[in-house]
C-alpha cells in the first residue's frame, strides 16, 4: 500500500481547474505543478512537444533558481505526470518515483530509457485519442472519396473543373491494429456501410470479427495475412504502435500489393512505412494517395517530396489533438491515481517486451 501521503509532480502546463481535479482525487495527494522555468530545466531545454517549436515567453524565475528548486521536488516525487520528453536520468533524480504517467499513447521514444526497465511503473494515455484520431481517419477517407484535395487546388486557381466523386459505402477498409483507435475506426467505417478487414497481432488464424470480439469487423486477420488485407483494401489505415515488429512493416513489396486506386492513411508512427518507397509508389501510381499525420523525421523537412504531391494530404502530427485532450488525460491519470492508492493494478502499463 502507498504511504500516508503521496507526492505527485506535474511536469507540463496544466490549467488550474485540471490541477484542482488531480488534487481533489484524494486527500493523501500532495500535488506540485512545476513552474515554466522548472519545466524547461526538467526537459533540459528541449521543446515541450517533439517537433513543435515552443513560443518564447518571460520566465517566472531564473534558470539557476529553477534548477535549485526543481531537484528537491523531483527527489521526493513518487508519481509523475509528464509528456514523453522525459530526462534520461530521471531514475537518479527521482529515486522515490514509483509511477510515471505519460500523456501520450506512444512510448517508442522511451523504450530504451532506463526508467522503463526500472522499479518505476510507466503507464500511457492509450485510449484518450480514439475519438479525434478516428474522426481524422474518416475525414481523410471522405476527402479522397469526394476529391477535396483537387477541389481545393482548383479553387485556389479559380478554375472550374467538374469531376466524379466516389462513395465509401461498400468500399473495403483494412485496419492495421485494433487498439482503442483502430476499434473506433472500425465502428465508424461499418456505420458508413464499408466492408472492414482488421489485422491484430494476437490473432493466430483468420476468423470473423464477432468470434474475435469485434462484431463490426467482417474478417479478423493474423499478421501473416497482411498481403491479403493490402490487396483487398481500398483504404489502408495504419493504427499500430511502433515496435521492432512494426518498424518498416510497409515497404515497397507491401505497397505493390495494394490496389492502384487505394489510399493509405498513417496515424501510427512514421517509421512503420518506408517513406522513400511510399514517395515512389505515389509518384508512379502504384497507389492512388496517402494521408499522413506522422513521418520518419518530424518536423517533416521542407525538402521532402511529399509536400508537393497532389495525391498526398500532409498534416503535422495533429490527428490526436482536441480541446479536450488534457481533460481526458487528467481523467485517466486520476483513475490511475485511485488504483495506485488502493494498491490495485494500473491501466495501460508499458510492457518493454511488447514495445507498448
Image (tube, grey):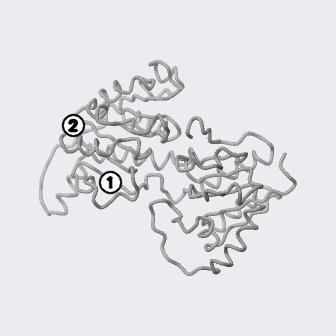
Name the secondary structure under disc 2.
loop
* Figure check: 342 above or below 254: below
Q: Is residue 81 left or right of residue 234?
A: right
The percent coordinates of residue 127 (x first, y second) are 56, 44
Q: Residue placed at 12% from the left, 53% from the top?
A: 161
The percent coordinates of residue 119 (x first, y second) are 73, 45
Q: Is residue 290 left or right of residue 20?
A: left
Q: Residue furthest right?
A: 4
Q: In the depicted view, which residue is nearer to us: 126 or 113? A: 113
Q: Is residue 256 left or right of residue 97?
A: left
Numbered disc total: 2
Can you identify the residue that label 1 sits on? 314
Picture disc at residue 286:
2
* The N terminus, quarter of image: top right
The percent coordinates of residue 47 (x first, y second) are 51, 65
Q: Quadrant of residue 35?
A: bottom right
Q: Residue placed at 40% from the left, 47% from the top?
A: 270
Q: Is residue 20 left or right of residue 215?
A: right
* The C terminus, quarter of image: top right
Nearer the N terminus, badge 2 or badge 1?
2
Name the secondary structure under disc 1.
strand
Q: In the depicted view, which residue is nearer to us: 348 or 215? A: 348
Q: Quadrant of residue 350?
A: top right
Near mark 1 (Cα within 10 A), the count class, few <14, some 14-19 or many ≥20, is some
CB atoms of marks 2 and 1 within 8 Å: no
Q: In the depicted view, which residue is nearer to us: 143 or 350? A: 350
- The span from disc 2 to disc 1 (Cα, nearest Å) is 19 Å
Q: Nearer the viewer, mark 2 or mark 1?
A: 2
Near mark 2 (Cα within 10 A), the count class, few <14, some 14-19 or many ≥20, is some
The percent coordinates of residue 212 (x first, y second) are 52, 23
Picture disc at residue 122:
none
Amino acid at each position: 500500500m502507498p504511504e500516508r501521503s503521496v507526492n505527485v509532480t506535474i511536469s507540463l502546463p496544466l490549467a488550474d481547474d485540471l490541477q484542482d481535479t488531480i488534487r481533489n482525487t484524494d486527500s493523501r495527494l500532495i500535488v506540485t505543478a512545476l513552474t515554466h522555468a522548472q519545466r524547461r530545466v526538467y526537459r533540459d531545454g528541449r521543446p515541450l512537444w517533439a517537433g513543435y517549436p515552443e513560443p518564447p515567453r518571460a520566465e517566472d524565475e531564473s534558470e539557476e533558481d529553477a534548477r535549485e528548486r526543481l531537484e528537491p521536488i523531483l527527489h521526493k516525487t513518487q508519481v509523475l505526470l509528464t509528456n514523453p520528453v522525459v530526462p534520461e536520468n530521471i531514475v537518479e533524480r527521482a529515486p522515490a518515483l514509483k509511477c510515471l504517467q505519460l500523456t501520450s499513447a506512444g512510448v517508442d521514444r522511451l523504450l530504451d530509457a532506463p526508467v522503463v526497465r526500472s522499479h518505476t511503473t510507466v503507464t500511457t494515455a492509450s485510449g484518450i485519442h480514439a475519438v479525434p484520431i478516428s474522426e481524422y481517419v474518416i475525414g481523410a477517407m471522405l476527402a479522397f472519396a469526394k476529391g477535396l484535395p483537387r477541389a481545393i487546388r482548383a479553387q485556389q486557381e479559380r478554375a472550374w473543373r467538374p469531376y466524379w466523386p466516389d462513395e465509401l459505402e461498400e468500399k473495403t477498409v483494412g485496419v492495421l491494429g485494433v487498439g482503442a483507435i483502430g476499434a473506433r475506426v472500425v465502428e465508424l467505417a461499418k456505420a458508413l456501410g464499408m466492408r472492414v478487414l482488421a489485422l491484430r497481432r494476437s490473432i493466430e488464424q483468420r476468423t470473423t470479427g464477432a468470434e474475435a470480439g469485434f462484431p463490426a469487423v467482417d474478417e479478423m486477420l493474423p499478421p501473416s495475412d497482411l498481403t491479403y488485407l493490402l490487396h483487398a483494401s481500398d483504404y489502408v489505415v495504419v493504427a499500430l504502435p511502433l515496435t521492432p515488429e512494426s518498424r518498416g512493416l510497409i515497404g515497397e513489396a507491401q505497397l505493390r500489393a495494394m490496389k492502384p486506386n487505394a489510399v493509405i492513411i498513417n496515424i501510427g508512427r512514421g517509421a512503420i512505412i518506408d517513406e522513400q518507397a511510399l514517395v515512389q509508389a505515389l509518384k508512379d501510381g502504384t497507389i492512388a494517395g496517402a494521408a499522413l499525420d506522422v513521418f520518419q523525421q518530424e518536423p517533416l523537412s521542407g525538402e521532402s517530396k511529399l509536400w508537393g504531391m497532389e495525391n498526398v494530404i500532409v498534416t503535422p502530427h495533429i490527428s490526436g489533438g482536441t480541446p479536450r485532450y488534457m481533460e481526458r488525460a487528467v481523467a485517466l491519470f486520476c483513475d490511475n491515481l485511485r488504483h495506485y492508492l488502493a494498491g490495485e493494478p494500473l491501466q495501460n502499463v508499458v510492457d518493454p517486451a511488447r514495445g507498448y
